[in-house]
Amino acid sequence: MRKDTRMPFESPDWRLDELLRDVGTGKIQLPDFQREFKWDDPRIASLLATVSRGYPIGVVMMLETGGEGSRFKWRTLSGVVSINGASPEQLLLDGQQRLTSLYQVMKSDRPVDTADTRGQSLKRWYYIDIDRALGDEGDREEAIISVPPDLTIRGDFGRRVVADYSTTEAECEAGVFPLRIVFDANAREDWSDAYKAGGAEQREKWKTFRDHVLDSIQNYVVPVIKLTKETPKEAVCTVFEKVNTGGVPLNVFELLTATFAGDASYFREHGQDFSLIKDWKHIITVLEKHQVLAKLENTDFLQAVSLLATRERRHNFVGRPDSSPKAPAISCKRGDILKLSLVDYLHWRDRLVEAFEWCAKFLTQQYVFRARDLPYHSQLVPLAVLRVILGAGADQHAVAAKLRQWYWCGVLGELYGGTTETRFARDVEQVPPWAAGGDEPETVAVASCHEQRLMTLRTRQSAAYKGIYALLMQGGCEDWLKNQRLDVATAYDLKIDIHHVFPKDWCNKNDIDAHRRESIINKTALAFDTNRIIGGKSPAEYLEAVEQRSGLDRTTVDALVATHRIDPETLRATDFDGYFEARNTELLRLIADAMGKEPVRTQDAPDIDRPDSFTDMALVESDR
C-alpha cells in the first residue's frame, strides 16, 4: 500500500472477494446523494466477461468515515438486504454500478435487478458457459449467459423450453457455471464434483476452466483510492463530480440533502429523519402561487441561506473583542453552501419563504408579472436576503425608494449576468448600511447605461430590454384599442407582449435599417388584438383603424399613444426619423428616473460597434 504524504488519500489494492464481502456486511455503503443502481443486462454481462479475463475495470474511490467530510446520510448498495444496523467504514464515491453489479451476481444469492436495453425491468441470474469461455477470449462476452428467475430460458413466446438450469445436474449437463457461487468455496467444490462426474473430458475441462477463468475471478484485485477522514466535504463533493462522468452532475441541493439527513444531532433532538427534498416541495408549493417566481430553483434558496448564515457569522466575529482582520466572508459560493448545517437552514428558512413572497409583490410593483419577463432571475437571491435583513423597514418610503434604485441599477446597468456570487455578497454587505444613510453600494455606484445600448437591445434575451418593457408599463402606458392600463390585472387577459411601433414589413418597404427597426426604441407593449390591427400598415393607417375599431376620437387615441413615451404626431406623419429621435430621448429619461442617474449620451461615450449581423431576428416577438 502507498500512502501519499501530500494529499489525504491512500491507494490500496483490494481483493474483489473482500470488497464484495464488506459491501454485504455494510462496511462499505453509499452516501445518500448517490443515484440509484441502473446498469442494464448487456452492461453487466460485459463487466463479468472483463473480470473473468482478469482485465481491469477501473479504479474504485471510497471515503473513510469519521470525519467532517463524510457527514452524509448513508445507505446500503442495492441488493444488500440486512446489515443489522452496521455503520459503514467506507463510503463509495465512485464504482457503485460496478460493485453493485458484481455483488448482486456473485454474493447476494438472489436474481439481479436489472433492465433490458429498452429500460424494461428484469431479474436475471448469470452463468458462464464453460466451453465458450475456453474458446477465443475475444468471444468471452458470448460466454456470459443471463437467465430468468426460474432458471429456464424459453422461446416461441414462452411455449418452448430452450434451456433448463433449474438443478445442479441440469447446469452441469449444459456446462454452465453459476456465478452466484464463485466465491462460495463449499458450493463451488460441490458443483465441480457434480460436473467432473461426467467423465474424463469434463474433468480436464474443469481444470482448465478453474485455472484460466475461475482463478482470474477469485484472485481479482481492484485498485482503490481511499480518501481519508481528514478530507473536507467540499473536496469530497468536487472529487465525486469529477469522477462521476457517467452520470448527471449533482448540485449542492442534492449534496446537502444527504448532509442534512445525516445530521445525528437533529435525529437525537427530533427523533426522525429530515428530508430537504420534502421540505423544498413544501416551500415551492407556497412560492409557485406567484408566477414571477416560477423559475426559482432550490439552489437559489440555498444561496440565500448561505448569504444570511455567513453574514451572521461575520457580524458575530467582527463584534468580538479579539477579532482580527481575517473575519469570515459573506458568501454563497459552492464551498460555503456545502458548509451549511441543518441548524443554519432551519434558522433562516421561514424568513426566506416570507421574503421571496415579498419579492413577488415588489416585482409586481415594478410591473414584472411573469418569470419570462423577469430581467435577472439571479437578482431574486440578494433581493430576498435584503428583505430578511431590513425586515419591515424595507417597506418604509425612503428605504423602498433605495431598493427600487438598486434593483433598476442592476437591471439597466446589466450587472447580474454571468458569475454573480461576488456581487451578491457585496449587495448584502453594502445595501443595508446605504438604506440607513450610508454610502452608495457598488451596484448603484458603478451602474451605467449608454445611449448606444438602446440600438442593440432587440430581443427578450436582454435583461435591459425586459427592464424597459416593464418601466413603460410602470409609467402608465395604456392600450390603444382597449383604452385600458397595461398592468397585472390586464396583462394576461389582453395577452400583452412587445411589438413593433413601425411594423417590420413597413420598415423593409421603406428602407429602414435593421439596427433601428429591431431596436427597443421601435418596440412597445401592446395587447394581442391591437397588434393584429397594426399588421404591416404604416402608423398613420393603423391609428385610423384603431379609431374606427375602438370608437375613440383622435385626441383620445393620441393621448393613449403618448402614454408609451411616443410622440403621436410623428406616427400620424409616418415620420420614422422624427419618431425615433423623440422616442430615444424619452426612453433615456425613463432610464434616468429609474436609475437615479443620467445615461451616458452618445457624444460623451466611446463608439460601440454595431453588430454586423442580425442572426437573432428569429427571437423577435412580433416578426411581421
Image (cartoon, rainbow, N blue to C red):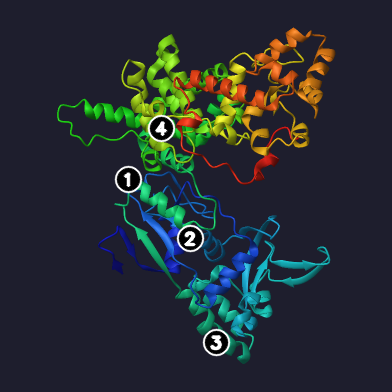
Callout in the foreground (1, 4): 4
**Disc sitting over residue 93 in the figure:** none
Tell whether label 3 touches label 4 (CB within 8 Å).
Answer: no
Callout in the foreground (4, 3): 4
Mark-to-mark CA distance, 1 and 2 = 22 Å
Mark-to-mark CA distance, 2 and 4 = 38 Å
- Measuring from the top left, give residue 241's x and y in whole percent: 46, 53
- Residue 398 visible? The answer is yes
Question: At label 2, which amino acid type do we have?
Answer: Gly
**Nearer-N-terminus badge (1/3):** 1
Q: Is residue 108 left or right of residue 560?
A: left
Locate the N terminus by quadrant. bottom left
Locate the C terminus by quadrant. top right
Q: Secondary structure at mark 2?
A: loop
Q: Secondary structure at mark 4?
A: helix
Q: Residue at x 53, y 34 (%)?
A: 297
Callout in the foreground (1, 3): 1
Q: Secondary structure at mark 1?
A: helix
Q: Is residue 176 left or right of residue 426?
A: right
**Nearer-N-terminus badge (2/4):** 2
- Please identify the residue farthest to the left as the structure is shown: 322
Mark-to-mark CA distance, 3 and 2 = 31 Å
Tell whether label 2 touches label 3 (CB within 8 Å).
Answer: no
Pick the front one: 206 or 79? 79
Q: Which residue is mark 4?
A: 424
Q: Which residue is mark 3?
A: 208
**Disc sitting over residue 95 in the figure:** 2
**Nearer-N-terminus badge (1/2):** 1
Q: Quadrant of residue 262?
A: top left
Callout in the foreground (2, 4): 4
**Disc sitting over residue 68 in the figure:** 1
**Nearer-N-terminus badge (3/2):** 2
